[in-house]
Amino acid sequence: MSAPLPHFDGELLLRGDSGFDDAAVDRIFNRRLPDRTPAAVLRVASEGDIVGGVRLARERGWQVAVRSGGHSWAQWSLREDALVLDLGGFKEMSYDPGTQVVTATPSVKGGMELAPYLASRGRIFPGGHCPTVGIGGFLLQGGQGWNARGWGWAAEYVTAVDVVTAEGELVRADAEHHSDLYWAARGAGPGFPGVVTRFHLRTLPHPRHLAHTVQGFALSDFDEVMTWLHTLHGSVTDTVEIVALTKTEPGLGDEPVLLVTAVAMVDDADEADRALAPFRTNPALERALFVVDNEPTTFEDERQGQLAANPEGHRWAVDNAWISGTPEDVVSATRRVCTTLPNAKSFTIWFSMAPLRELPDMAFSLQSEIYLASYVPWEDENEDARHQEWLADAMAYLQPVTVGQYLGDSDLARRQLRFVSDASWERLRKVIAARDPGGLFVGYLAGPDGATNANHWQA
């Protein structure tokens, strides 16, 4: 006979309870929902609920899964027979003007909630581009945020994490205390052996001036433009975020186009003009469908564009790769995934990380000078197979130039690539074994053989 259920500030729903089915999939962004049913869902309302939830799971023999923002493409929080800790109702933020550190809970949305909170204080945190993404999964996976090539990975700004361990104890992990958890919390992703209740984050002064350059081209110019960009991007000053993408652009017809975008995050218009000047050397500029050159913008304007590109209520297939090679090899390998998009809502991005910065000692440890990811949304479930098959086929062409993958856009159950260095993988496995020897936390969703941190191209 099971012990009585403890009191929670939030709501505990067991399988079979009224409202359980909706709670199990609540806030999951990718509506291509899997056939997995948790044992229970705890809608967390306080830090004490997280502690109590972990202890209850230990008593009941459940594993523990965590849902922060719900934006995992693979729905990592929806796990068979596990207790889902849904953190959506547990949102707290505080800022210390003395240390310029902001503290926030995992379900706080980086763009919609944390960014304006900090902007009102003249500060910024390099959070994710999509405004509705919660900071929890984003940071645990490394955090590819605004101007990552210049400001670095968002996980580099984590000064401490508050964590509920597998024993149900709340601890603070930083460089000097529980340093193994602090190391793992910056890159382990869903393999992290604990539940983060709060992140403590270093902030930056808010840029005084933002300006962007946007150039649009027909796909017939893809090879020339991308060859030029590949040779240029590493020499551009690191105050500029550089992204190329292919998408269907309103007002430019029904066919996808190539967009070269650059956002300068600087002190004034003159500095922006100098920073964006290299993009005026594009050899195909005279054939551009349109050109926006050094036009003032804001983070809010940029976020609105991200919201439009990432619609709610859709089914998604997403994949990615860290790529490296000569301009000729990279352009050839990326042509298919960039130029044969399967529908008008899909898009593929090419994201510059060059020149590569040396990473600090943290679990996140694998990157290359170019990040490529393809995002395919649709609404009709009858189109599932077609879109997934297109993505798998198009990504397969990247194999000759692929270094690995970024956890934030990955589904390890469909295809595995390396996501941390070999040394970090061995270290991470030891941390997980020491901190969670009984496998209380669900870990990676990676098929029958588990996560391997190795390149496997066959799905």
Image: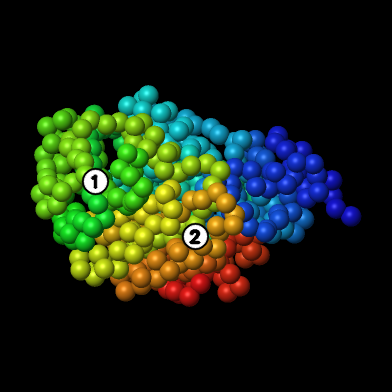
Residue at horizontal 45%, vertical 74%? 456
- Please, what is the three-letter code of the amino acid marked with disc 1? Gly
Q: Position of residue 210 (x, y in %)?
A: 24, 33
Residue at horizontal 33%, vertical 59%? 338
Say few, some or many: other residues with alpha carbon within 10 Å of mark 1 (under 14 / 14 to 19 / 20 or more): many
Q: Earlier in the sequence, mark 1 or mark 2?
A: 1
Residue on which the image places disc 2: 387
Q: Position of residue 152 (x, y in %)?
A: 30, 49
Residue at horizontal 63%, vertical 57%? 34
Residue at the top extreme? 120
Residue at horizontal 74%, vertical 54%? 39
Horizontally, residue 430 falls left or right of residue 37, namely left
Which quadrant of the figure contains the N terminus? bottom right
**Is label 1 in a helix, a strand or a loop?**
strand
Residue at the right extreme? 1
Q: Position of residue 321 (x, y in %)?
A: 37, 63
Q: Is residue 439 visible from the viewing direction of this image?
A: yes
Horizontally, residue 322 falls left or right of residue 455, namely left
**Is label 2 in a helix, a strand or a loop?**
helix
Query: In the depicted view, which residue is nearer to us: 12 or 221?
Result: 221
Q: Is residue 150 visible from the viewing direction of this image?
A: no
Q: Position of residue 166 (x, y in %)?
A: 63, 55
Q: Is residue 254 above or below residue 449?
A: above
- Please, what is the three-letter code of the amino acid marked with disc 2? His
Query: In the depicted view, which residue is nearer to us: 60 or 374?
Result: 374
Residue on which the image places disc 1: 216
Q: Is residue 432 above or below residue 95?
A: below
Image quadrant of residue 183?
A: bottom left
| Colour mapping | rainbow
Q: Could you tell me how far apart the alpha carbons at marks 1 and 2 are, in whole angstroms? A: 26 Å
Say few, some or many: other residues with alpha carbon within 10 Å of mark 2 (under 14 / 14 to 19 / 20 or more): many
